[in-house]
Amino acid sequence: MHTVALRTESSRPINSTTPNQLIVGKRRMGDMFAFHATIMANTLNTPIIVFTRTGSMAILLSHYRPCSTIFAFTDDQRIKQRLVLYHGVMPIYMQFSNDAEETFSRALKFLLNKGHVVGGDNVTLVQSGAQPIWRKESTHHIQVRRIQG
């Protein structure tokens, strides 16, 4: 299966579909949001950081094949195990704080310590979903942040 996957990946043309073709027919906000987050991360050449309880946004991001890694932080071991199967996703288990900034800081510290990111670089932070982590209603945010090193 590994060989088949590698052959298939190498035979697919990169960015063969125009953005308008991808957006046509997308009815869900999450699909459009993942598409635009991927475009932003590819344009700026940044890794993507997403916090997820269900894994859905990490899976949507994976569908659009960003050029860099999707660091998917989750507080559920089962979701972490499931996300391993998706292209470009590096799932990381971490307990979430009630404070979004504290959780984000801990995630960046983890990535810095493991050598996945370098101080001074930018990252694309994606916060989205019907089951938001830090708000009571559905929310969608894309932010580009500089890593303090």
Image (cartoon, grey):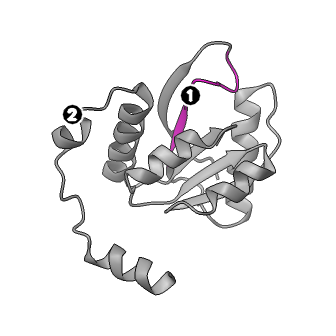
Residue at 42 percent across and 82 percent down: it is: 4
Rendering quarter of residue 28: top left
State the residue in front, 122 or 137: 137
Q: Residues within 10 Å of mark 2 (few under 14, many from 20)?
A: few
Name the side, left or right, on which 96 lies relative to 46: right
- CB under 8 Å between callouts 2 and 1? no
Task: Indicate which disc residue 24 carries.
Answer: 2
For disc 1, the marked residue is 129
| Residue shown at the point (77%, 25%) measured from the top left | 99
The one nearer the camera, 79 or 47, is 79
- Measuring from the top left, give residue 98's x and y in whole percent: 80, 25
- Say which amino acid is labelled 1: Gly
- Whole-number angstrom distance, CA of label 2 to CA of label 1: 21 Å
**Mark toward the viewer: 2 or 1:** 2
Observer able to see residue 109: no
- Horizontal and vertical percent position of residue 53: 70, 37
- Left or right? Give the position of 121 relative to 131: left
Q: From where the camera sits, is residue 119 visible? A: yes
Q: Is 131 part of what is drawn in magenta? A: yes
**Secondary structure state at the residue bearing disc 1:** strand
Q: Nearer the viewer, residue 24 or 111?
A: 24
The part of the chain drawn in magenta is 123-135
Question: Residue 110's image quarter?
Answer: bottom right
State the SS at label 2: loop
Specify the amino acid type for callout 2. Answer: Val
First in sequence: mark 2 or mark 1? 2
